[in-house]
Image (cartoon, rainbow, N blue to C red):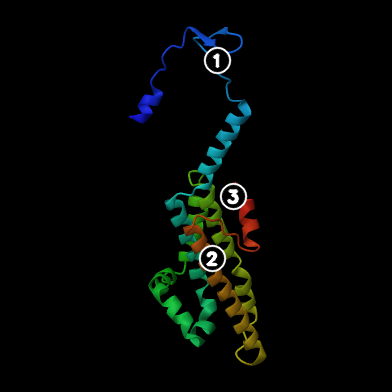
Amino acid sequence: MAISHLLSPLPSLTGQLTLTGRSSSSLPLNSNPHFPKPSPSRERAATLVLRSKGDDSVDASDRLISAVCYFYPFFDGIQYGKFIITQYQPFQILIQPLFPAIKAFKSFPFNGFLIFITLYFVVVRNQNFSRYVRFNTMQAIVLDVLLIFPDLLERSFNPTDGFGLDVVMSLDSTVFLFLLVSLIYGFSACLFGLVPRLPIVADAADRQVL
């Protein structure tokens, strides 16, 4: 009711205002006063502020899709944790809830390739998805592509004991820890609507997302 009262038309202020004092004078009041219009710069600034607030918000669906994508490189590279998972029980407890999903992912040898094709052509190259989703999806894809290098190194250098085995164990454990940290960091950042930027991976993802 207060708002409607404020928005109701004001009564016409016609007539004369008499000022009393040492000398009396009459000032005519304009029945149709003109108020200065806001400057275009202020209107433009307000528009930019509102637009920037709208762009900064990330939809819940975009957050969820982006967060789930980071499971793809982790599932694809879970074999690099074979040494560290068997040696340290906390890692077993941490990974145990994901065992059914990992088993389903590894059940078919071409699952990784099919998911790669799906994510790249259905999500990254699809302008219907927001850039936030396409960037995070591409970052997960690039991270998975980088797994080719430790895989090639392990296939060409596959010792069974001695110093060589220690090197392979260290390499595999390092790759696994990087994948695990990337999963935790990327997943949690996306849930909060932030943009996770992984070292090396983020720049390559930026160049692929238009």
Q: Which residue is mark 1?
A: 34
Residue that sits furthest to the left in the current view: 1
Residue that sits furthest to the front in the current view: 22
- Image height of 66 relative to 24, above or below: below
- Nearer to us of marks 2 and 3 is 2
Q: Nearer the viewer, residue 176 or 106?
A: 176
Question: How many other residues sit within 10 Å of disc 3, few (<14), some (14-19) or many (≥20)?
Answer: some
In percent of the image, x 58 and y 13: which residue is there? Answer: 21
The quarter of the rendered structure image containing the N terminus is top left
Secondary structure at numbered mark 1: loop
Q: Which residue is mark 3?
A: 209
Whether pointer 1 and pointer 3 mark residues with C-beta atoms closer than 8 Å, the reply is no
- Nearer to us of marks 1 and 3 is 1
Task: Find residue 185 and name its label.
Answer: 2
- Image height of 4 relative to 104, above or below: above
In percent of the image, x 51 and y 69: which residue is there? Answer: 74
Q: Position of residue 76 (x, y in %)?
A: 50, 69
Distance from the alpha carbon under mark 1 to that under mark 3: 51 Å
Distance from the alpha carbon under mark 2 to that under mark 1: 57 Å
Distance from the alpha carbon under mark 2 to that under mark 3: 21 Å
Secondary structure at numbered mark 2: helix
Q: Earlier in the sequence, mark 1 or mark 3?
A: 1
Q: Nearer the viewer, residue 178 or 122?
A: 178
Q: Amino acid at mark 2?
A: Tyr
Q: Position of residue 87 (x, y in %)?
A: 51, 87
